[in-house]
């Protein structure tokens, strides 16, 4: 806490001496800085470091899974469905080689995405 106060004092000194701001402006800036610090302190004390790490990990996992499911859906709608309906002509062997497990992947990852969303929302 002492280091933080020293840093705040330095900011105040720079504002008043080096930038020559009027006292009222220095006070306004310092109030804004202190208000922001209070919000940061409240956030950091409301969760343990382990909880914060887990929360960050879940958010990252959720974002990655959303993107992956979205890309799989685009692939199915943009390529696989037109191939299956004959709009795009591709040899069966080629289609099976490229898309053999796309439906399974899409189902598994869609369900995984739902599970992750439930966990993140606290409905596990």
Image (cartoon, rainbow, N blue to C red):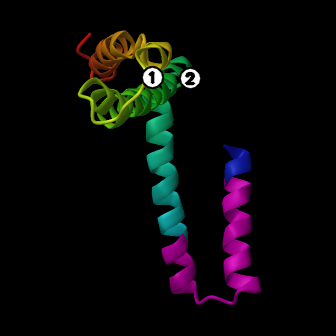
Quadrant hosting residue 104:
top left
Q: Which residue is mark 1?
A: 58
Name the element at disc 2. helix
Q: On the rendered image, what quadrant is the N terminus found in?
A: top right
Compared to residue 38, the image places residue 16 above or below, namely below
Bounds of the magenta segment: 5-29
Question: Which of pointers 2 and 1 indicates the residue nearer the eye?
Answer: 1
Q: Which sits in the foreground, 46 or 7?
A: 46
Q: Could you tell me residue 11's position as x and y percent?
A: 69, 68
To which residue does mark 2 refer? 49
Compared to residue 4, the image places residue 25 above or below, namely below
Question: Is 22 in the magenta?
Answer: yes
123 sits to left or right of 83: left
Q: Secondary structure at mark 1?
A: helix
Q: Position of residue 77 (x, y in %)?
A: 29, 33
Which corner quadrant of the image does residue 81 belong to? top left
Q: Are marks 2 and 1 in contact (CB under 8 Å)?
A: no
Q: Is residue 15 magenta?
A: yes
Q: Is residue 84 left or right of residue 10?
A: left
Q: Residue 118 at what x, y percent from top left?
A: 27, 17
């Amino acid at each position: 806490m002492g280091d933080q106060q020293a840093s705040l004092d330095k900011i105040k000194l720079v504002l008043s001496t080096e930038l020559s701001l009027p006292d009222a402006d220095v006070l306004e800036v310092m109030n804004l800085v202190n208000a922001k610090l209070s919000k940061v302190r409240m956030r950091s004390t409301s969760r343990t470091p382990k909880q914060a790490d887990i929360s960050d990990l879940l958010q990252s996992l959720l974002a990655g899974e959303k993107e992956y499911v979205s890309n799989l859906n685009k692939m199915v709608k943009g390529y696989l469905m037109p191939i299956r309906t004959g709009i795009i002509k591709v040899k069966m062997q080629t289609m099976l080689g490229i898309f053999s497990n796309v439906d399974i992947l899409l189902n598994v990852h869609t369900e995984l995405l739902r599970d992750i969303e439930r966990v993140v929302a606290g409905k596990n």
